Image (spheres, rainbow, N blue to C red):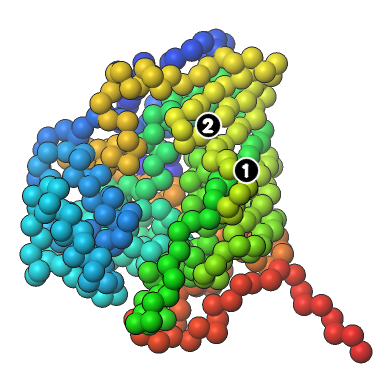
Amino acid sequence: MAGTIGVIGTGSTAAVLSSCGGGGAGANKPLKAPGSYYVPNLVDFANDGQELKAGIIGCGGRGSGAAFNFLNAANGITITAIGDTFKDRVDSLAESLKSEKGIDIPESMRFVGLDAYKAVIDSGVDVVVVATPPNFRPIHFQYATEKGKHSFLEKPICVDPVGYRTIMATAKQAMAKNLCVITGTQRHHQRNYVAAYQKLMDGTIGEITGGTVYWNQSMLWFRERQADWSDCEWMIRDWVNWKWLSGDHIVEQHVHNLDVFTWFTGLKPKTAVGFGSRQRRVTGDQYDNFSIDFEMENGIHMHSMCRQIDGCANNVSEFFQGTKGCLYTDSGNNAVIKDLAGNEIWKYDFEAEKTSTVQQDPYVLEHVNWINHIRSNKPIDQASETAVACMAAIMGRESAYSGDMTTWDAMTASPLDYLPKDLNIGKMDMSGFTVLVPGKPLAKKE
């Protein structure tokens, strides 16, 4: 995996789980030689070692969840500082930490405001969990790295080309400082996905010739504006519906599936052509469906589909076609390989995982792996790889918004920056937050 140092081999449990079923792997030509690609050691609990003090940046639903995922991953760890744009979010997490974990965060270590991340990072913590709205994550990662902190970055880690370049440059700095950076693309720490990845690398479906990825579900949450909320406060509290904050749902959510394809193939997209629209979303300025055709750098195609509309067919999965067969994976712990005749030749055994492991939650396992890297002094960079998946999503989004083909080269060099120039917690110029319409305007009739 690009940018990763300190390859960790799989433990005995992972080895057993990844070999469930048949498939005649001995006759296959591996896509990559064993040991040349990264496989996390998905043990149930992190090894004991140096004590670690964590700071949580972003105390909403995912930030609070990540805080407890971190605490459930190891002994000898704690949370000493928390920060968010809003005081009620900070106090809510503080109350949960005290009632559920006995961790008392004093008022002096509860930081509020758009600059709260600096106070958290400067408070004496060893590691930071960055779970703010996605647009802020490159800036927060950059500051944490400058201060020598190990970072856990929730996905997506950038929403525009400026953020992408910030992430890539900061990831290099993190590696130079011997830091460990793990991201919230939790499929990398979900055992059925790791096992499926190993089967692909073993050559079980042959050379990968294309595939499809999906995240189709019902409408996501939203926040109705309250009378006392400023423009900025409303958007940040309702962030998942605003493209400058979330990157739109193709970036914020569908990046998981795009990441699986770029991870499994090791390929970046060369071009993207797609479309999308807004049908039922009730707040914000985003689309609620996208369909994108990606041509990868070696010429194969990936079709990407995502939707957030009630009452439609749902599907969260990935499909890979190979010269010898096909692979299906999904978030429900399924992974199945079939040959070209449609015969099932391998299936991931989740029941075996449940009986042979204690921890099956990938949200916890990603923190286990992070802590183990830190304690063993083996730096790791998942940010660079996750940034590739984010850029793929950005390419697809901008193609749908404009109606044009986008290219990797043009988009990675683009000056496009979604961060508002007048960002402040009060009144903002809302005229630019509009739903985009693809294509050139119709010519006026004389």
Residue toward you, 262 or 108 = 108
Viewer-closest of 364 and 379? 364
Residue 279 at what x, y percent from top left? 64, 62
Q: Up-down: is 272 above or below 445?
A: above
Element at label 1: loop
Residue 366 image point, x, y percent: 31, 40
- Indicate the secondary structure of the residue bearing disc 2: strand
* Residue 287 position in % (x across, y down): 60, 63
Extreme residue toward the bottom, this view: 446
N-terminal of the pair, mark 2 or mark 1, is: 1
**Where, quadrant-wise, is the N terminus in this rendering?**
top left
Q: Quadrant of residue 92?
A: bottom left
Indicate the amino acid at tag 1. Ala
Q: Amino acid at mark 2?
A: Thr
Q: Can residue 419 be seen in this snapshot?
A: yes
- Residue at horizontal 68 percent and vertical 49 percent from the top: 293
Q: Which residue is mark 1?
A: 313
Drawn side of residue 346 relative to residue 80, left or right: right
**Is 83 left or right of 78, judged from the image as shown?**
right
Task: Measure the alpha-carbon separation of dots 2 and 1.
Answer: 18 Å
